[in-house]
Amino acid sequence: MIQEAHRAPCPAGRWTYITVVLGAALGMLAGYAPLFNATAGVFVRPLATEFGWGRSEASLSYAASMFGLAVVSPLVGTMMDRYGVRRVIAVSAVVFGIATASMALQNGSKAMWVGLSVVVGVFGAATSVLGYLAVLPQWFDRRLGLALGVAMCGLGAGTVLMPATAQYLVTGYGWRTAYVVLGAGSIALSLLACSLLRERKTAGRAQGAARGQAVDGVPFVEALRSYRLWAIWAVFVLASSATLSLGPHLPAMFADRGFSPADAARSASMVGIGLLIGRILTGVLIDRIHAPFVACVFFGGGALGIFLLRSAHDYQALLLATTLIGLTIGAEGDLISYLVRSYFGLRSFGALFGIAFSGYGFGAVIGPIGLGAWFDRHGSYDAPLLVLSFMLLLAGALTLSLGRYRRAGDLPAVAPAAASA
């Protein structure tokens, strides 16, 4: 694997590595996924009641925001290469927080509802894993997987805390106040996270290029012609389509089998537990085992979970299924950054990470809509669940086709960029 830039002494010492991970964790806790996506279900009922919308109309916000995120991710990655990760995150976090607070201005116009949600997704992209996980490969190599796993715990914690916070605010103060408080809180926590982050200078930025400096890595144009980049993109289109499509539909699946709302809620909790374990476990394993092998195992486990969800009727078996699916979702977040770093280096990391992450975003749009459309037409989830299982198996096969990592000596480079903090 590409060797660690931090062989060079770092004046800030070990504390810098700790604060970078803590900053990434805090930023993801208050970023797009926990603050907006994870709380979307809390706002569906009050909005539907106030404006006379159906549940599907009130839920359009999720798909619209994910579409905005997916479209803009490659551009955000390119901007991080050029202007630096912290700067892009800070500006995006402020606009994202303002856009979230502005959701309180809804007047029943569906165009406003969808349009503002797209804006939230566009500026929320840099406050997601796309932004915060782009910093860690600058500092870590042999322990990159562990650093990613620990940082992603912030996202897991936010996914648990933010919906509960939103529900408390909606119940006590109304949905408009809830949006304002969440938006303001996101800005404050995100700027605190940015103050903890540190960056190493990389050659992808214009000023570094002007000095003739470069780091190990594949040039952007060459990477665009690489099978590996588009295979990674396809892996995460398939994987996110298969796993993230289930979130909005799990309660209905349990209800269809006669289980209570409390039992359905417990299944969602098991997804969350699996997700948190998956992030840490994946991070530990990919530091020791070839990442495509790890990905294949997790994707295979997710395929088994979806198959169990389709065929099992015993509650304990269904809880096992949702846990396996959660493990797979947790693994996906760590793998995107790790695979891009391992196969393409840091030279154009932001732009290439943005392209790979856009695949994850598009899958999160396609999957839930496709699954819901099939059920509305055929009244059953059986056929699409079988297809989703095979999609995860295909994603695993694609990761195995990536081959060995590119070593530092294989990557074009001139003089290395400054390695000090």
Image: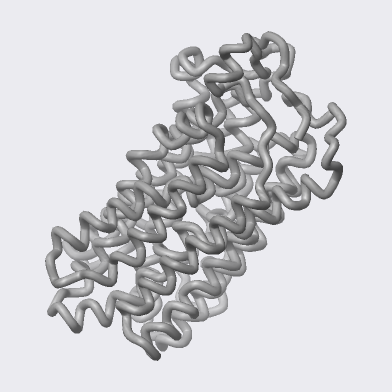
**Image location (x, y in percent) of residue 394:** 47, 39
Question: Image quadrant for the C terminus?
Answer: top right
Judging depth in this view, the residue of 243 and 4 nearest the camera is 4
**Image location (x, y in percent) of residue 23:** 65, 54
Left or right of 367: which side holds 324? Answer: right
Q: Is residue 140 above or below residue 351?
A: below
Left or right of 376: which side holds 183? Answer: right
The image quarter in which residue 5 lies:
top right
Coloring basis for residues: one colour
Q: Residue at x 49, y 18 (%)?
A: 220
Judging depth in this view, the residue of 198 and 284 nearest the camera is 198
**Image location (x, y in percent) of residue 232:** 50, 32
Question: Image quadrant for the N terminus?
Answer: top right
Q: Residue at x 42, y 83 (%)?
A: 169
Q: Is residue 154 visible?
A: yes
Q: Is residue 310 visible?
A: no
Left or right of 234: which side holds 18? Answer: right
Judging depth in this view, the residue of 410 and 163 nearest the camera is 163
Left or right of 46: which side holds 255? Answer: right
**Image location (x, y in percent) of residue 132:** 58, 47
Q: Is residue 139 above or below residue 123?
A: above
As drawn, the residue found furthest toward the bottom would be 172
Q: Residue at x 43, y 48 (%)?
A: 92
Q: Residue at x 74, y 37 (%)?
A: 140
Q: How many marks?
A: 0
